[in-house]
Image: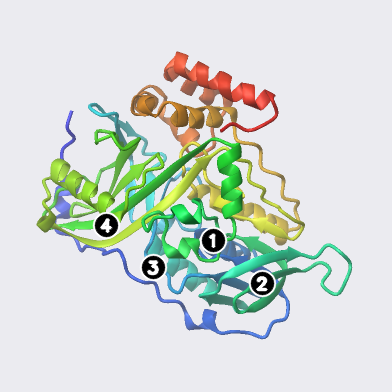
């Protein structure tokens, strides 16, 4: 069954040539944030000013923190380099910024489309440029916050021995040492060995200041590791071809010869959409290969030749889906947040909601003095599902179709947003192919019983 290129609903047709909100613009930084201070010891130093770093800074300020805060980041500017998507299952400080909201979303296993409708929990899409603008403006409204860009962070040392630095954390940077009472490390990590990092794997800003490639190496060796790497183009067509009522979450009806692959389409108007080519595999494709595949998809699915649309922005990334147990508190005064803090959902790669939940815990810990309880280990079902994707990728398109077709919508959304119960897990298990999953479950449980993680 072929999905229509354009919805015939009155709402979609009435939209006409609505003003296109171009992507790809640089977000200006308020001047007040860039002013350097002579603070000797900051209350909090935040390493990384991406989604996690800016979110936790906003959360701390909203909770009433007034002491000096410094944010350190290797980027030189805030490029429009991301789109964060999530289901609206709980309030966040940024949900109102969503450029698109979908009550329905669709999956294709190769030939058949399955469409899910869930108006109670719409799928929201947030542009990086809108997030950065809102977060930076909100932070700039509070005195005492300093943002240092173009700074590479090196060693982070928590001083546990009673001396003149006792109770402080020293952070070495290319601009000298920074001292703070608490450090929140939001840098992420280099997910690939340096020698294997293609230009299309990660934007420069994601790699700058990252000192955790060793952590990635350990995770790859000790756990199941399924890489989600992608390139996306923000395209504006010369005619209305996109269905604004439906998001194509996963279209597996594309060439699978290079590894497990799907295309993801998020329309923000009948003329504009984010189109991503996604691999759940260690493909070695470069940027040009991804772009060529996206252009081919636009032609075959929407009838858009290369001169029928323009590209107003792009994004790329490498998201490890892994059941590795990340250490959120490597020392008494250092907290890891974001991907390195385990905010990424192991079996899906979604991270935004995990970051917002982590921010609430950090605020409780630093501002309210409530002990941060350790994260529970990755659920058994997540580990099994992830291992299944790693071992049996050829079955993945059918498995996703069955999941969206057979599992009750509420239970499906709860699983996708890490809010599922044991009953929901049971419903998911009953919907999936039994023999392959039983074999995978036995493999995972055998390794768990031996007291070590799977590869």
Q: If you read the primary sequence from the N terminus, does the residue marked by circle 3 or circle 1 appear first? A: 1
Which numbered mark, 1 or 4, is in the foreground of this view? 4
* Rendered view: 200 above or below 41: above
* In-image side of 420 versus 127 (left or right): right
So how many labels did they put on this image? 4
Element marked by disc 2: strand
Find out whether the residues at labels 4 and 3 contact each other: C-beta distance under 8 Å.
no
Q: Name the residue under label 1.
A: 55
Mark 3 vs mark 1, CA separation in Å: 17 Å
User: Quarter holding the N terminus?
Assistant: top left
Residue 209 or residue 17, whichever sits in front: 209
Residue 302, image x, y percentages = 15, 45
Residue under the image location 60 percent in, 52 percent down: 214
* Rendered view: 123 above or below 239: above
Q: Which residue lies furthest to the right in this view?
A: 162
Mark 3 vs mark 2, CA separation in Å: 26 Å
Residue under the image location 72 percent in, 70 percent down: 170
Displayed quadrant of residue 36: bottom right
Mark 2 vs mark 1, CA separation in Å: 23 Å
- For residue 79, the mark is 3
Element marked by disc 1: helix
* In-image side of 161 versus 251 (left or right): right
Residue under the image location 41 percent in, 61 percent down: 203
Q: Name the residue under label 4.
A: 234
Q: If you read the primary sequence from the N terminus, does the residue marked by circle 2 or circle 1 appear first? A: 1
């Amino acid at each position: 069954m072929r999905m229509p290129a354009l919805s015939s609903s009155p709402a979609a047709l009435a939209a006409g040539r609505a003003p296109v909100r171009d992507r790809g613009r640089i977000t200006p930084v308020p001047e007040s944030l860039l002013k350097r201070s002579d603070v000797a010891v900051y209350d909090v130093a935040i390493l990384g000013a991406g989604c996690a770093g800016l979110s936790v800074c906003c959360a701390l300020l909203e909770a009433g923190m007034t002491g000096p805060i410094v944010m350190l980041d290797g980027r030189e500017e805030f490029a429009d380099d991301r789109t964060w998507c999530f289901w609206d299952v709980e309030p966040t400080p940024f949900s109102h910024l969503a450029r698109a909201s979908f009550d329905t979303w669709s999956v294709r296993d190769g030939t058949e489309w399955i469409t899910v409708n869930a108006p109670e929990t719409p799928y929201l899409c947030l542009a990086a440029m809108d997030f950065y603008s809102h977060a930076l403006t909100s932070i700039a409204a509070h005195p005492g916050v300093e943002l240092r860009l173009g700074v590479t962070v090196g060693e982070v040392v928590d001083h546990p021995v009673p001396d003149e630095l006792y109770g402080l954390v020293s952070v070495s940077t290319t601009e000298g040492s920074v001292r703070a009472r608490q450090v929140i490390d939001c840098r992420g990590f280099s997910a690939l060995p340096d020698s294997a990092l293609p230009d299309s794997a990660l934007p420069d800003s994601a790699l700058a200041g990252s000192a955790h490639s060793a952590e990635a190496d350990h995770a790859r060796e000790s756990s199941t590791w399924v890489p989600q790497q992608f390139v996306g183009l923000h395209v504006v067509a010369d005619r209305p071809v996109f269905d604004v009522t439906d998001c194509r979450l996963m279209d597996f009806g594309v060439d699978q010869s290079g590894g497990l692959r799907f295309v993801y389409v998020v329309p923000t108007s009948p003329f504009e959409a984010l189109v991503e080519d996604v691999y759940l595999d260690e493909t070695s494709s470069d940027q040009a290969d991804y772009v060529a595949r996206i252009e081919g998809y636009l032609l075959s699915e929407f009838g858009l030749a290369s001169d029928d649309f323009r590209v107003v922005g792009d994004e790329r990334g490498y998201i490890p889906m892994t059941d590795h147990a990340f250490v959120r508190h490597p020392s008494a005064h250092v907290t890891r947040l974001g991907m390195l803090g385990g905010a990424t959902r192991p079996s899906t790669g979604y991270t935004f909601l995990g970051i917002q939940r982590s921010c609430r815990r950090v605020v409780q810990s630093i501002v309210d003095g409530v002990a941060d309880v350790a994260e529970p280990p990755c659920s058994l079902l997540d580990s099994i599902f992830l291992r299944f994707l790693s071992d049996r990728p050829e079955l993945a398109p059918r498995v996703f179709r069955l999941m969206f077709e057979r599992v009750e919508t509420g239970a499906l959304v709860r699983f996708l947003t890490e809010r599922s119960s044991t009953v929901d897990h049971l419903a998911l298990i009953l919907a999936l192919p039994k023999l392959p999953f039983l074999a995978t479950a036995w493999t995972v449980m055998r390794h768990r019983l031996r007291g070590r993680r799977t590869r």
